[in-house]
Image (cartoon, rainbow, N blue to C red):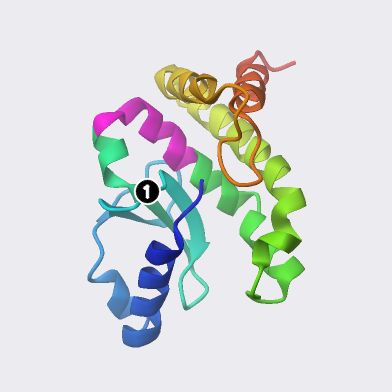
């Protein structure tokens, strides 16, 4: 999921100003049951969740606290999905393709974003299924259906594409 520039700048700014260890002291965290990655909860971010690295290159996840509180089943999917971005190496692919952040990073990574989102969705579905958390899978599918034919984010798949992908991924193993 995406993170607005202001929140990203705030996190990066704290890391640059105070050092990454100090920055974490000022941001609330939760224990993420799906991976051992520091997961920050912020109230005033428009995005639901995002994966990134801190100024020290360590993986972090940022999630919208209101979404976790108001939609706990969907929150399970979001947390697992962001863990999957890290475990699948998606952030490393961004850095490798960009060679660092440039003035228009999405120009270089946009073609890969759609596939990465579908991969992270499928990974999250498998993770939730293994933990017998079908409510998280159904909440994710329901959320994607609400988008319909509209993209779920900049350069992301449509809601219909993601909902169909979730159903396929949730199917029985062969």
Query: Image check: 135 left or right of 98?
Result: left
Would you place residue 136 above or below residue 157 in this image? Answer: above
| Residue at image coords 39%, 29% | 74
- The residue sitting at 62% across, 17% down in the picture is 167
Between 134 and 143, the residue placed more toward the observer is: 143
* Residue 20 in view of the camera: no
Secondary structure mainly formed by the magenta segment = helix
Q: Quadrant of the C terminus?
A: top right
Q: Quadrant of residue 15?
A: bottom left
Q: Is residue 96 left or right of residue 64?
A: right
Q: Residue furthest front?
A: 150
Q: Please give the range of residues in magenta.
A: 70-80
Residue 95 rendering spot, x and y as whole percentages: 67, 69
Residue 133, image x, y percentages: 42, 22
Q: Nearer the viewer, residue 109 or 26?
A: 109
- Judge whether 128 appears above or below 15 on screen: above
Dot 1 crowding, Cα within 10 Å, few <14, some 14–19, many 20+: few
- Which residue sits at x=69%, y=17%? 173
Question: From this viewpoint, is residue 160 visible?
Answer: yes
x, y (%) of residue 161? Answer: 67, 25
Left or right position of 159 against 18: right
Which quarter of the figure has residue 121?
A: top right
Which residue sits at x=28%, y=79%?
Answer: 22
Helix, strand or loop for disc 1: loop
Label 1 sits on residue: 46
On the picture, is 49 further left or further right than 92? left
Q: How many marks?
A: 1
């Amino acid at each position: 999921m995406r993170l607005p520039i202001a929140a990203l700048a705030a996190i990066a700014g704290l890391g640059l100003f105070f050092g990454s260890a100090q920055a974490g002291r000022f941001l609330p965290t939760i224990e993420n049951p799906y991976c051992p990655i520091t997961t920050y909860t912020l109230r005033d971010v428009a995005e639901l969740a995002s994966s990134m690295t801190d100024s020290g290159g360590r993986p972090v996840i940022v999630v919208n606290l209101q979404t976790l509180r108001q939609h706990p089943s969907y929150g399970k999917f979001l947390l697992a999905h962001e863990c999957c971005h890290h475990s699948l190496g998606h952030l490393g692919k961004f850095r490798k393709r960009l060679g660092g952040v440039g003035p228009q990073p999405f120009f270089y990574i946009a073609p890969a974003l759609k596939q990465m989102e579908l991969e992270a969705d499928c990974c999250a579905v498998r993770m939730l299924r293994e933990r017998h958390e079908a409510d998280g899978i159904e909440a994710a599918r329901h959320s994607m259906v609400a988008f319909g034919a509209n993209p779920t984010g900049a350069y992301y798949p449509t809601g219909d594409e993601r909902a169909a992908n979730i159903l396929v991924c949730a199917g029985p193993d062969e």
